[in-house]
Amino acid sequence: MGYVAVKGGTEAIEASIQRIKYERLNHQHTIDAAVIQETMKPLIDQVMSESSLYSRELAALAIKQAQGSMEEAVFLMRAHRSTLPRLYYSQIVDPEDMFVKRRISASFKDIPGGQLLGSTNDYTHRLLDFDLAHEARETIDAWLHAYERDMKQSVKTAEEIIYFPKVVDYLRKQGLFNWEEMNDTPPDDITKESLQFPASRSARLQSLTRGQTGAVTSLGYASLRGYGQVHPTVGEVRVGDAPIYIEHPNETDTDREDDYYIGDIELTEVESFVPVTVKNEANQNELDFEIGYGISYGQNETKAIAMSILDQCLEHPEADFPTHDEEFVLLHIDSVESTGFISHLKLPHYVTFQSKLDSIRQIKERS
């Protein structure tokens, strides 16, 4: 489809861009990107996840530039990501090496290593705190001082970093879950090659973790409600910092001990236990469990849980539900693709619409 430039369009577009800046600055208040980065962590995490670019600084800048619009911020980050050189590929990240800040299980009250509630809104009362409208620096400093003092008094200094075992491994040792063979097949990279169907599991997981948070959550919820009737039990949610290593660029046969540590990234990982009915050797139905997997940048637990639901759904394309159709799911959760295609409806469609009007006129004249 071609679009015809409107006379004076360039001037109108420039004026529109200036108007955006005017509306951002007109109230004489601006917010530093550093303030966004430090005070809006869930928003930062969501933008990084959907853009598949881990940079809190750039995410904060994109949010400021987009004036808080999530879809625009993700668009900006994806566009910037496409300009960056790919210097290295990291080594495989093992979530068991994660420095855990939050770890819970809905499957067991007591799990190896214990439950670690960490930072979450799950246990708050969801009542508006009107004191936040008038926070003073003195009040903040006093609260922080008291909190840090109490922490030092109540928490013993750890002599070593504690790594928490996986809940599913505990069940595997009991023979309740199968041990899966290691799959060393190089993963597909949907940022370098277009998504093809049927998609590999690595491509599906990439699409899901890059998917728009609301869309992934909505489809996961649809499956829970009855479009597939998948009702998992969350085996484990863990949030923490995972170390990233790269191998020496000129030495490919070195041991892992010789890899270079380049930093940590915060991740949310979810393993859900999904009950399924299978046939045993006697061709009788019996209950078994499959694992749905979800992972996301930052602390993005709802999305990661919904992702684990859809991961298990897409492993069963034979089911006659939209949430089991990988083409339906994967092509409609991409935030940039979906918002871009809907937004393009605002662009000129003069020629095509006039053509349709002419067709209607001709039909009415003949009738």
Image (cartoon, rainbow, N blue to C red):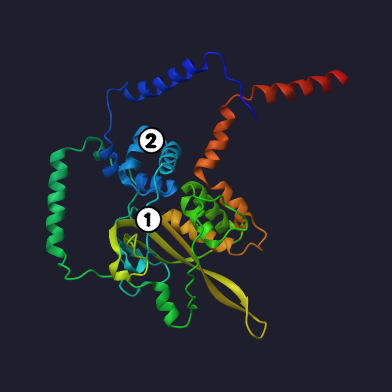
Mark 2, secondary structure of its residue: loop
Indicate the quadrant where residue 280 lies. Answer: bottom right
* Residue 47 horizontal/vertical position (percent): 40, 45
Q: Amino acid at mark 1?
A: Tyr
Nearest-to-viewer mark from 1 and 2: 1
Residue at 33 percent across and 41 percent down: it is 58
* Residue 361 horizontal/vertical position (percent): 79, 19
Q: Amino acid at mark 2?
A: Gly
* Residue 44 horizontal/vertical position (percent): 35, 45
Residue at 52 percent across and 48 percent down: it is 215
Q: Residue furthest toward the front?
A: 250
Q: Which residue is mark 1?
A: 88
Residue at 48 percent across and 47 percent down: it is 212
Indicate the quadrant where residue 97 lies. Answer: bottom left
Rendered view: 25 above or below 173:
above
Q: Is residue 226 left or right of residue 102?
A: right
Q: Residues within 10 Å of mark 2 (few under 14, many from 20)?
A: some
Residue at 87 percent across and 20 percent down: it is 366
